[in-house]
Amino acid sequence: MQPRPRVWGPPPGGLVGRDFEVGRVVDLVGQTQNVALVGPHWSGRTTVLEVVCRALEDTGRHTHLLPASWRWSRPRPTHAPPAGASLESFLDQLDVREVMDLGSPQTDVLVVDDLEHLGARTAQVLGNLARRTGVPVLVSRLPRDPGSGMESDLSTSSTWVQVDLDPLAFEDLHRLLSERLGDTLSPEVTAEILHESGGLPGLAIAVLDAALAHGRVRRSDGLWEGTAGWERELSAMFALLLDPLTAEQRGAAAVLARTGALPADLAGEVLTPDAVAALHDHGLLHTSTAVEGTPISLFPPGLASHLLSQVDPRLAVAASQAARAAQSSGAADVRRARVADRLTSPAPRPAPSHAHHPSGMPLALTGLDTEGPVVRHDLASAVEAWQRSHGLRDALRLLRLTTPDPRGAGIVESVFAKTDTATERSASAHVEFRYAAARWSIIQGDDPHAVADRLREADEPEAAVRESLWLLGYLLDVEFGILPEEYERTLAPYVRGHGSGAATARLVLAACHTLAGRQPPARSLLDVDRSSWPDWLDRTAQLLLGLSSYATGDLAGAIEHGIAMRIRAKRDLSTSSWAHGTYVAALGLAARGWMDDARGHLLGLLSVPHSWTDPLPAQQASRSMLVLLSVLTSHSALAPGLVESATSATHQGHALPCSGSTFFHAMRAYAQGDVASAATALRRSADDLRRGGLVLPAETLELTRLLIDREAAIPDPTGSGPSRIAGPYLRALLTARTALTREDPEMLLSAGAQFELLEIPVEAARCYTSAAELFHHADQPDRTAQATASAAALHHTALASLTARPRHRLSKRETEIIHLIAQGRTNPEIARVLFISVRTVEGHIRQIRRKTGATDRTSLGDLSAFSA
């Protein structure tokens, strides 16, 4: 029997992300259902099983844990069964008579950990026992086809419910690791561990422990920070995952490491269907349904690099066989030819980081690495290239991949001190290098306006370089100051020139127009052939075009533009474009009301090098927006780490939406629960920005204030300002809140109609109910009856949708929580009433929100009207 690594136990604060699964299993067992907990190696199956057992014991049930080594020793009967009885019924009677009496289905549960370790006869006995007595069976097992193997023996004429233990989401993993450390953890460390472990909690904690043991994660001023992982330790962990594989299966995994992700049909031809099935059964494959062709890849992500680092002669044989299989299946097929080329070319060296795409972008966000693990523009190769040449182009490539935190500070200082700029003739390269040096000096604490003066006074022999630096110094003053009223008259003459100076002038003037809220002239300046523009200027032009769509309320266009930037970034291996595209897409998603989606995009930036060398870098704005969205979506555990790991003073100005020290400190107060201080700071800052000509960031601050301050007055919910950049959901929300403030029932009906169009019946019914109350107080019985009927119809619609679709149906426990919320109970009070943890309550509430679209606690309580 293969030993099972036990690398983690229940953390002090509970199971965090698994609380919902625990509650669901307890509910199912309470309904006498047989449940299979299904998860790959290191997924925490055993720990979840143990916590479920404790929870069942707390409810008065008795759990009988069957050791994996237990075997049913009674031999099969050799004589024939009695006349008229089937062999199955005969065995059934023998089993029930010989096995101990477990009691009743209402008081007892039979528990089996690692089902695959049981013998077939033992499983059959247990299945008969469960079927005859009705005692529910709770098992854990590895992923594989349902209804096969031991479970088919257990499930004879019995109904099984499968609960999949998926990898933990970012927030849940962050809370788990933070509780293990007992203090605040840098979100960047969580991001690295997430991608090294694939989100498997057991593997994640092992990676964290290894990083702690070797000093790669350290505690400084109450914050754990550093880099995660340790190659030697990770190799040992991956060896444990590979240990159960046969030589042929290991060879198939090594071939997949060489090829990268393969479409499922092609993988079956190259690796054989049996090998693919075996790797899937062992939990070592990840399938992407979001990409055409359903490609599969090795899982967790670092497993491919581990296999490539091993020197094994059998790998060459396996690769050769797979190459022949690809070629013989159809050499004319481009996909097969590409796979054959990868397998016959020299083996690539593994990436230095297990977790990342060669570009430095996380695998979970780039999609599957269909080009294989070939290292091209990663940080290690960039360092090597610069050390050989000390040239300007290699220096710029290296600077784009470094981070401005202490881990990359030494590299950055060396690049600025030792790069030989005399050998490079490109004016654009010189400008980019000087501008990067200027931003670095701001990061080191220099006054931004003094840095801008140095750019304008730069002693450069080439006129084009001097002109570009003067223009960039002007933009730097705007970013950290105000927008002069005469900016267009000052900058327009430079646009009429030629070469890189004119391109820089177009970019700077377009940036000023965008920030001033003048989007048509901004777009016309950038709507030119930019093929000759330097990449770093074109990247910023793409950012401005996305911001322009956002500023005019074209949120679908902003989202589409941001995603297109990310696609190009993946193709060009540009982390700056990736960061800018993510920021633009997140702005559009958040303004549209899709807060969770926006937050999911921004989480990916935590493990991507910040684009600090470009004009108007978005890293600080992205971080502040992530704090806001984390609190708005009830994922506030991430906020302290984001706040603490940020430097005390922001190194970015206030020109971009959600940027600047004021916005960041307002988000710090909001994350700490001080809504009033946050709202006051946002209102004052918005007024200052508008007076300074920076309309776009001012409107974003106003919209943010209205979102976080439920008591804020909204003078004109349908006019200009924040309403223009809000999507339909936020406009409906602002209309409803204005109507309640003004006690205007007609406006409430309008808001309710907007919510109906958006298919959010809970919010619509709430608007109609409030309107009915106002009509009643105004002594308008006909209008009261109409509004009441509209609310009642929506209650029935919402009830029908919740009962008709199993995925959206509320469980018994969720219904209990809704009724307690309607009574005004707090989460701790609900936990005490139901004898569950506060985090379990929070997990149920998040699930209810996902199922129903309820947006706040009031609308959650309103659900009680149609969830009885």
Image (cartoon, rainbow, N blue to C red):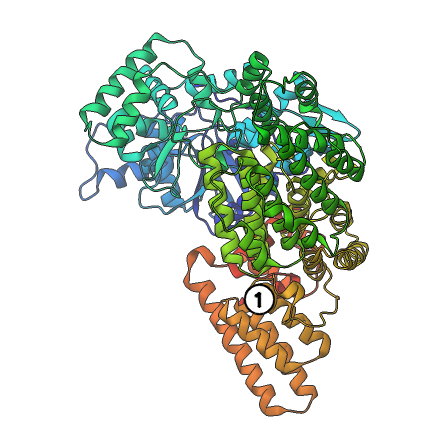
Question: Viewer-proximal residue, 842 or 53?
Answer: 842
Question: Viewer-proximal residue, 405 or 364?
Answer: 405
494 up-or-down from 40: above or below:
below
Point out residue 474 in the picture as x, y percentages from the top left corner.
72, 43
Which residue is found at the position 53% from the left and 58% from the top? 555
Tell whether 263 sits left or right of 786: left
Which residue is found at the position 73% from the left and 28% from the top? 459
Point out residue 613 in the picture as x, y percentages from the top left corner.
64, 33
Badge count: 1
* Residue 52 seen in the current view: no
Point out residue 796 in the picture as x, y percentages from the top left corner.
49, 73
Check disc 1: other Cα within 10 Å, few if <14, some if 14-19, many if 20+.
many
* Residue 254 seen in the current view: yes
The image quarter containing residue 250 is top left
Q: Secondary structure at mark 1?
A: helix
Image quarter in which the C terminus is found: bottom right
Image quarter in which the N terminus is found: top left
Residue flagged by tag 1: what amino acid is it? Answer: Leu
Point out residue 587 in the picture as x, y percentages from the top left corner.
59, 52
Question: Viewer-proximal residue, 160 or 524?
Answer: 524
Tell whether 849 sits left or right of 463: left
Residue under label 1: 863
280 up-or-down from 343: above or below:
below
137 up-or-down from 519: above or below:
above
